[in-house]
C-alpha cells in the first residue's frame, strides 16, 4: 500500500509541475469559459440554456489536453519499465496513475466550476446536479484517457492522436452527463436514469482501463 500511495503523491506532483499538465488544463478551462459569453453575446437566457453543455465539453477537452502526460514522463526517464515489472501489479500501478490524473486535472476543474457556472448564468437548481454528474463522468473520461495514452505512449506529442482514438468513447459519457444534469435540474420524470447510466459507463471504464492499459504498455515496451 505504501508504494502505491508514494506513487500517487509523486504523480500528482508531476502533474502540477508539468507545463502540459494541470496548469494548462485549468488555464484552458478558465480562458474558454471567460471568453465564451463574449462570443455568444449578452443573451443571458441563451447562456442559461447552453451552460451545462459548455461546461461539460470544456471539461472533456481539458482532460484530453493532459492525457499524454499520464505515462509520458515515466516513459522518458525509463521509470515506466520499473513500475510495471519491479513493484505491485501493473494493473494497480495504472489504477493509481488514473486516479492521480483525476485528482490533478478533473478535481481542480470541479472546484472552480461553481464560480464559472454563475458566469454562464447556470440555472439556480443546476449547480449540485452539474457537480455530481461531472464528478462521476470525469472518472470515466480519465479512464479512457489512460487507455489512449498507454496505446500511444511511445509516440511523442501524441495528444491529437489520443484525442482521435478515444473521442468515440467520450461521446456517450458526454451525452448522458449533460442529460443527467438537465434531468435532475428540471426534475423530469425518472430524473436519475441518465445518472445511473453515466455511473455504469464510468464504472465499466475504470474496470477495463487498468487491464487494457497494462497490455498496451507491455506491447509498447
Image: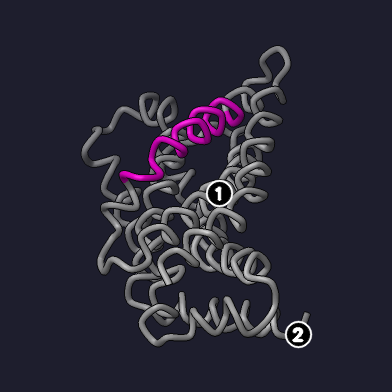
Residue depicted at x 48% and y 44%? 118
Residue depicted at x 59% and y 66%? 94
Q: CA distance from mark 2 to mark 1?
A: 26 Å
Question: Left or right: where does residue 156 sit relative to residue 112?
Answer: left
Q: Is residue 68 magenta?
A: no
- Residue 67 at what x, y percent from top left? 41, 60
Residue depicted at x 70% and y 84%? 3
Nearest to the observer: residue 128 or residue 105: 105
Q: Is residue 109 above or below residue 153?
A: above
Quick one: label 2, few (<14), some, or many (20+) residues within 10 Å?
few
Nearest to the observer: residue 46 or residue 108: 108
**Label 1 sits on residue:** 138
Quick one: label 1, few (<14), some, or many (20+) residues within 10 Å?
many
Query: Toward which corner of the image does residue 182 lie, by quadrant?
Result: top right
Residue depicted at x 40% and y 79%? 73
Most common SS among magenta residues: helix
Nearest to N terminus: mark 2 or mark 1: 2
Residue range (magenta): 164-181
Amino acid at each position: 500500500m505504501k508504494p502505491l500511495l508514494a506513487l500517487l503523491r509523486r504523480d500528482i506532483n508531476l502533474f502540477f509541475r508539468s507545463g502540459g499538465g494541470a496548469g494548462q488544463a485549468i488555464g484552458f478551462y478558465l480562458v474558454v469559459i471567460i471568453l465564451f459569453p463574449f462570443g455568444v453575446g449578452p443573451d443571458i437566457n441563451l447562456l442559461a440554456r447552453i451552460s451545462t453543455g459548455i461546461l461539460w465539453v470544456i471539461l472533456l477537452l481539458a482532460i484530453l489536453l493532459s492525457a499524454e502526460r499520464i505515462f509520458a514522463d515515466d516513459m522518458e526517464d525509463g521509470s515506466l519499465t520499473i513500475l510495471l515489472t519491479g513493484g505491485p501489479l501493473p494493473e494497480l500501478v495504472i489504477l493509481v496513475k488514473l486516479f492521480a490524473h483525476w485528482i490533478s486535472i478533473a478535481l481542480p476543474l470541479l472546484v472552480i466550476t461553481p464560480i464559472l457556472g454563475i458566469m454562464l448564468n447556470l440555472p439556480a437548481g443546476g449547480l449540485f446536479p452539474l457537480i455530481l454528474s461531472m464528478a462521476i463522468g470525469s472518472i470515466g473520461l480519465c479512464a479512457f484517457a489512460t487507455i489512449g495514452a498507454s496505446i500511444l505512449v511511445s509516440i511523442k506529442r501524441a495528444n491529437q492522436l489520443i484525442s482521435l482514438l478515444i473521442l468515440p468513447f467520450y461521446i456517450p459519457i458526454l451525452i448522458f452527463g449533460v442529460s443527467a444534469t438537465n434531468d435532475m435540474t428540471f426534475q423530469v420524470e425518472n430524473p436519475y436514469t441518465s445518472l445511473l447510466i453515466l455511473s455504469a459507463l464510468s464504472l465499466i471504464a475504470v474496470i477495463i482501463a487498468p487491464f487494457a492499459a497494462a497490455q498496451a504498455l507491455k506491447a509498447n515496451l
